[in-house]
Amino acid sequence: MILLKLAWRNIFRNKRRTILSGIAIGIGLASLIFTDALMIGMIESMIRAATGTFLGQAQIHAGGFRETFEVEKTIHDLDNVIRQLSSDAAVKHYAVRTQAFGMISSPANVSSIIFYGIDPAMEKHISKIDEAIQKGSYLAKDTTRRLLIGSRLAETMEVDLDDRVVITTAQATTGQLSQEMFRIGGIFHFNVKEMDSGVVFMHLEKARSILALENDAHEISVTFHNTDQNADQFLSFRERYSQGGNEALGWRDLLKELDALLNLSDFTKYIIALILFGIVALIILNTLFTSLYERLFEFGVLRAIGTRPSGMAYIVLLEALSLSAVSGLFGICIGLIVTYTFSIYGIDYRGIEFAEVTFRELIYPVMTVHQYIEYPLWIMLFALVAGLYPALFAARLVPAGVLRRSM
Amino acid sequence: MQNKNAELIKAIDVSKQYRSGEIMVDALNSVSLTIKRGEFTAIAGPSGSGKTTLLYMISGLDIPSSGTVILDGKPVSAMSGREQSDFRRDHIGFIFQSYNLIPVLTVRENIEYIMLLQRVPEGERRLRVSEILEEVSLGGMENRLPTQLSGGQQQRVAVARAMVSRPDIILADEPTANLDSHTGESLIEMMRQLNERRGMTFVFSTHETMIMERAKRLVLLKDGQIEKDEIRSQGPGVRD
């Protein structure tokens, strides 16, 4: 107890040094807390942008469809799957779609596209197509001969609202070409290059008719009541719907690049943490050694009057611990204030595209308990590790040597 | 270390060389000395004569280059660092030239420190601190920090710290060097009285004539060798 008291009071002997070290360590910790919170916020925003725009949280396809996109590979036993989804308590919304490659031609140009047949009512709950309409209007019930076209594609095709375009595609089973003329009903802008330059949306029934699919579909997009992107629901969903030749996948399986990025973000966070902890360790090492050299005679006296070598080491380690505790407290306060402020007002990254995902909303750092417990504990652990060398140095001091040297 | 008149510390043919920059210094040269219980011994000599080195040798703070120092019947060289620390904690009290109290601890905590290392129960600690503070005329100052005391008062606390653990011997390295003559004289007088009343053994280094005159035994060092070792006939506390 006396050693703890001694260590605690010692760190306040040179207040300026302790304050400077504390600020440096505290700012390091606060940066780590903020970075972590920002990354969580950014990832959540990216996931929301990726899944909320059009993808959904999970999808069902016929097995092998995603590899070949063959028109005839439609979802097996669609009615039964829809019945299951309708009665599934975990499922919030779903939307049935067709998906096929085709050509779009206007008087000015021709371009390859992916065209989706969508149910406008269902789709409103799943995707943000209606919100992305820049010109014109979303698909209405009585507008089956109208389609929605991406803004970049409209530029390429040199078309505008009400202009005519022709969609050409291969029909299911027979493979015969099918052509249909449409008018531009709306121009959407997702700020996602692939969507804006190569995608067209039309009514589901019209798409089925072009593709000769009767009542079949290629894709069902699903959202869940539980918005936790890492919840177990994906596993159970996959198991439940990957049956009868169908394949059910969560967004992580569908967006491999984003998944890889998320894994990389964890790794990046550890690297940042390691660098910061390393800097903290160096600050503590420097502070302890400076303090130790200033008090060499005092350490000699403590040894002379009977403090064991281990006691000397304890004093230094307790000083490291005390310094990191004070700095940690400071860092927690700063981290809390900064992170809380930005979690209220957000950070504007809107319009910036990263890993094929465009930020569509403000990023709000997310505060978690682990940031305020785990990181300060790591700082203390690193402080202890950093304190080992000066502690060993103090334990090995030859009393007569330091007493003589200091006189 | 229970027998009266027993040998507390014995240095046999002790020599010490240490490096000072590029130069090897012969601090002690074949010094033999025995300290017995109840002695009031002054180790005197000019600066650089080896007084402090001899004190460090006989307290186990330093290891001789050659020769043997025997503490409690055991050679220092055969003791581990921990054993040496425990021996100093339990048997030796130190008073340093420049007080060397721990500045962040109060007077009470400075005095209690060794007893805490010895795991003396709290009640006894408090009692002993109060008694010793009265004895060194510092009653009521237990909660002050060393910086709030005068030099003489700080040295009294240092004496109290050295005495409170009831060591067999107190080693003092020029205890009056930083004090004015009046304060120094009263400090030596206090130590002498403790020696007389409690039979506490004192060994102190000095180059001041006034202190030498108060010693029962005078060991005179010159160039790292004992030039004179005499038991003074007039007894402690009696001036020539």
Image (tube, rainbow, N blue to C red):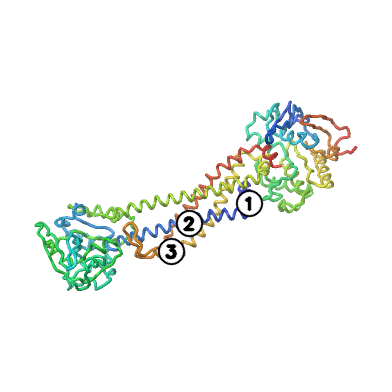
Confirm or deny contact between disc 3 and disc 2 (CB under 8 A): no
Residue under mark 2: which chain is it in? A
Tell whether A255 sits left or right of B215: left
Find disc 3 in the rendering and name its residue. Answer: A343
Residue B217 in percent (x, y) is at 83, 33
**Residue under the point 25% across and 63% down:** A197
Find disc 2 in the rendering and name its residue. Answer: A31
> Gap between marks 3 and 1, in whole Å?
37 Å
Residue A167: name its quadrant. Answer: bottom left
Residue type highlighted by circle 3: Ser
Would residue B74 be seen by someone viewing this image from the given angle? no
Residue B93 in percent (x, y) is at 72, 39
Task: Depth check: give the residue in front, A81 or B123.
Answer: A81
Residue A258 in percent (x, y) is at 32, 55
Task: Depth check: give the residue in front, A160 or A130.
Answer: A160
Residue type highlighted by circle 1: Arg
Residue density around tag 1, few if under 14, some if 14–19, many if 20 or more, within 10 Å: some
**Residue under the point 70% across and 48% down:** B126
**Residue under the point 65% across and 28% down:** B78
Mark carried by residue A181: none
Mark carried by residue A9: 1
Residue extending farthest right: B240
